[in-house]
Amino acid sequence: MINKNNKYLGAALVTITVAGMVAAPQAMAKKAKKVQTSTVTEYHHSVTTTRSNTSALEAQLRVLQDEVASLKAQVKATAPTAAVVSADSQKIQELDAWAASVKADHGKHEQHEKHHEKDNLLYFRGGYAGNDQALAATTNTATLANGQIATLGTKGGTNGWNFGAGIDFNLNDNLFGLVDKTNLLGELDINYVDLGSFRAGAVSGVANAAGVPLSNAQQASQSMLRISASPKIKFLKGSAIRPWIIPVGFSLNVISPPSQANTITVLKPALNFGGGVDYNVWKSLYIGADVRYFLATSQLDGTNVNGLTAGGLVGFGF
């Protein structure tokens, strides 16, 4: 019985062994096929991924090429034409001319500051005064019945002194474009003239046998006030020395004492002419000299107001 069982076990082992030998190649073939399929799949996936990345790079490259082309088009569109270049050149020339003019003006300003020149001037002047004739006044003259003028005392003098003040206002820097470096100014001048003293007699109203009124002789002074408004032309702007002229101006003469008896008046208009020079000493300080002549076309009831003044001045520019 045991032997019989052994035989059966041996047969079963042989069968199992043969079956295993037959099944093993098939299993190995299936496994190899599975591995081959997986490898092919991975390869195709890799190829697909590579192709996808290449397509993305190509797309990015095309985008960059499009942007470059767009930039080139913009640069070409904004490139200056010949007309634009010409206009820019003209603008540059205008700017250069403007810069040159600014530099020149700055140089003029420096020259102006160097001499501390001011266009306006407050001045004080004085010196000699002389009249063409002695003034005839109520204090020393009277008209007689026969029309003659009797002298009650001594005649007034024709020489004396003057003192006054004035102000120059600048109106234009180049005489309205006619002359460079030439100022036109408006001047207001007030001047006092003293022609000395004389022996005068107060008329008592009683005449002697000769028809000459009796009087009490006393010392008196004779003077005149001149108020003038004149245009003044001053040359050499920018220089420390400035000569000037007054071509013609208006003057109002006030005499004291008033004109002779029976024709008592004090005001006489006249013309005035003058010339002189100003010198800038230091900063706003000026000194100078001037000569002026005052001319009335007629007498003031027998009184001649024509005369001359000459002297120096001290001024302050502003």
Image (cartoon, rainbow, N blue to C red):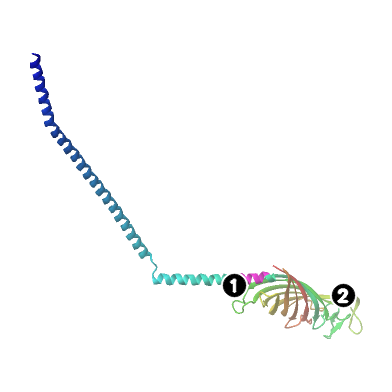
Residue 303 percent across, percent down from the top left: 79, 81
Question: Considering the image in quadrants, where does the N terminus appear?
Answer: top left
Can you identify the residue that label 2 sits on?
220
- Tell me: 290 left or right of 101: right
- Disc 2 secondary structure class: strand
Side (left or right) of 76 relative to 1: right
Looking at the picture, how far across and down is residue 59, in whole percent? Answer: 28, 53
Mark 1 residue type: Ala
Identify the disc placed on residue 280: none
User: Looking at the picture, how far across and down is residue 291, in whole percent?
Assistant: 75, 80
Q: Quadrant of residue 192?
A: bottom right
Residue 100 occupies quadrant: bottom right
Read off the magenta span: 104-113
Q: Residue furthest top?
A: 1
Q: Residue at x 51, y 69 (%)?
A: 95
Q: Is residue 204 visible?
A: no
Label 2 neighbourhood size at 10 Å, few (<14), some (14-19), many (20+)?
some
Inter-mark Cα distance, 2 to 1: 61 Å
Label 1 element class? helix
Most foreground residue, 31 or 67 = 31
Q: Which residue is mark 1?
A: 104
Instruction: Please state, as top left, top right, bottom left or bottom right, where the C terminus lies in the image.
Output: bottom right
Report the residue that reaches farthest toward the front: 3
Nearest to the observer: residue 17 or residue 86: 17
Instruction: Please indicate, yes or no, whether residue 42 appears anywhere in the rendered image.
Output: yes
Ranked by sequence position, the earlier of labels 2 and 1 is 1
Residue drawn at x 45%, y 69% as measured from the top left? 88
Tell me which amino acid carries mark 2: Ala
